[in-house]
């Protein structure tokens, strides 16, 4: 499978501008999982901007919707 970096960049909601992984989803996911985090694309914009990408924050979002 060929990575479509330029297409991925247009859909990436990450607000961290100097990110070297923008558009490289596999690298992004691997990077965040090493830090016990999830990538920006699983959070709504108002949460993503806080840079709290923890599993706990994600779980709270899911439970709040239930």
Image (spheres, rainbow, N blue to C red):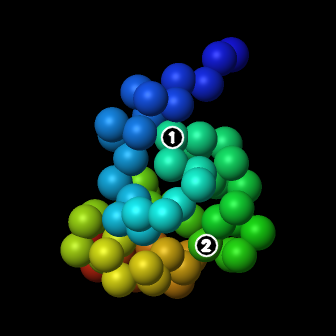
Mark 2 element type: loop
Above or below residue 59? Residue 44 is: above
Q: Which residue is mark 2?
A: 37
Q: Is residue 59 visible?
A: no
- Foreground label between 1 and 2: 1
Which label belongs to residue 23? 1
Residue 25 percent across, percent down from the top left: 58, 43
What residue is rendered at 38% in x and 47% in y?
12
Categorize mark 1 by other alpha carbons within 10 Å: few (<14), some (14-19), many (20+).
Answer: many
Check residue 49 in the rendering and tell me which mark sits there, or answer none.
Answer: none
Rounded to the nearest angstrom, the CA distance separating label 1 from label 2 is: 18 Å
Q: Quadrant of the N terminus?
A: top right
Of callouts 1 and 2, the N-terminal one: 1
Left-right relation of 50 to 37 = left
Location of residue 41 with respect to 47 vertically, above or below: above
Find residue 61 and report its image quarter. bottom left
Q: To which quarter of the image does residue 41 belong?
A: bottom left
| Quadrant in which the C terminus appears | bottom left
Question: Within 10 Å of the Cα at label 2, are there few (<14), some (14-19), or many (20+) other Cα atoms?
Answer: some
Disc count in the image?
Answer: 2
């Amino acid at each position: 499978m060929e990575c479509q970096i330029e297409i991925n960049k247009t859909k990436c909601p990450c607000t961290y501008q100097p990110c070297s992984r923008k558009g490289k989803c596999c690298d992004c996911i691997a990077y965040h999982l090493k830090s016990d985090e999830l990538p920006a694309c699983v959070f709504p914009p108002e949460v993503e901007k806080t840079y709290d990408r923890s599993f706990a924050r994600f779980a709270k979002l899911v439970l709040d919707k239930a």
